Amino acid sequence: MDNWQYLLVLAACLAITAPLELLGAGVYRQAPRAAAAVLPVAAVFVLWDAIAIAADVWTYNPQYVTGIAVPGVMPVEELLFFVVIPLCGLLTYNAVDTILGWLQRIRNRAEHAK
C-alpha cells in the first residue's frame, strides 16, 4: 500500500479542493484558461526534474511510488504533481477571490446604508 501514497496525497488534494469549484467562475469550467496557466509552468518543472534525475541529483523512493514512469524519465506521480498542485492552488485562489469579493460588496452596501 505504501507505493500508492504519492497518488493518494494528490487525490486527497483534489478531493479537498473540488468543492471550491462551486465558488465563482470556476477553474475546471474554464479549462483552456486553467491549462494556459498550468501547463507552461509544468513543462518547465518536468524538464528541470528530468535533468536532475538524469544527473542523479534527484531521486524517488520506490517504496512510495507505483513504479509507472513517464517514458522512463520520472514517476507518473511527479508529472501529476506538477498539474494537480497548481490546479488546487487555482481553485483556492478563485474561491478566496470570490469570497473577498462578496465581503467587499457587503461592506460597500453597509457603508452606503449609513
Image: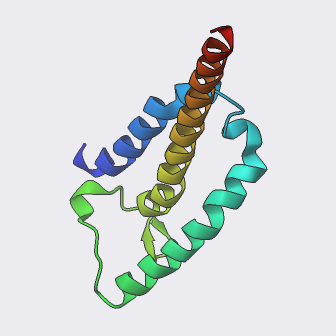
* Vertical order, 8 against 53 (above or below): above
Q: Is residue 53 left or right of residue 108?
A: left
Q: In this view, does 25 lie to the left or right of 95?
A: right
Q: Is residue 99 left or right of residue 57?
A: right
Q: Which residue lies furthest to the top in this view?
A: 113
Query: Coloring scheme of the render?
Result: rainbow
Q: Which residue lies furthest to the front in this view?
A: 114
Position of residue 82 measured from the top left corner of the image (x, y, whole percent): 49, 60
Total numbered labels placed on residues in the image: 0
Residue 91 at least partly seen: yes
Q: Where, by quadrant of the figure, is residue 16 drawn?
A: top left
Q: Where, by quadrant of the figure, is residue 75 drawn?
A: bottom left
Position of residue 85 measured from the top left corner of the image (x, y, whole percent): 47, 51
Residue beneath the point at 49% across and 33% down: 17
Q: Residue furthest bottom?
A: 55
Q: Nearer the viewer, residue 79 or 107?
A: 107
Residue beneath the point at 56% across and 26% down: 99
Position of residue 84 measured from the top left corner of the image (x, y, whole percent): 51, 50
* Vertical order, 36 against 57 (above or below): above
Position of residue 28 measured from the top left corner of the image (x, y, whole percent): 68, 39
Q: Nearer the viewer, residue 71 or 107?
A: 107
* Vertical order, 78 against 57 (above or below): above
Residue 71 at least partly seen: no
Residue beneath the point at 64% across and 63% down: 39
Question: Which of the image's four quarters has the N terminus?
Answer: top left
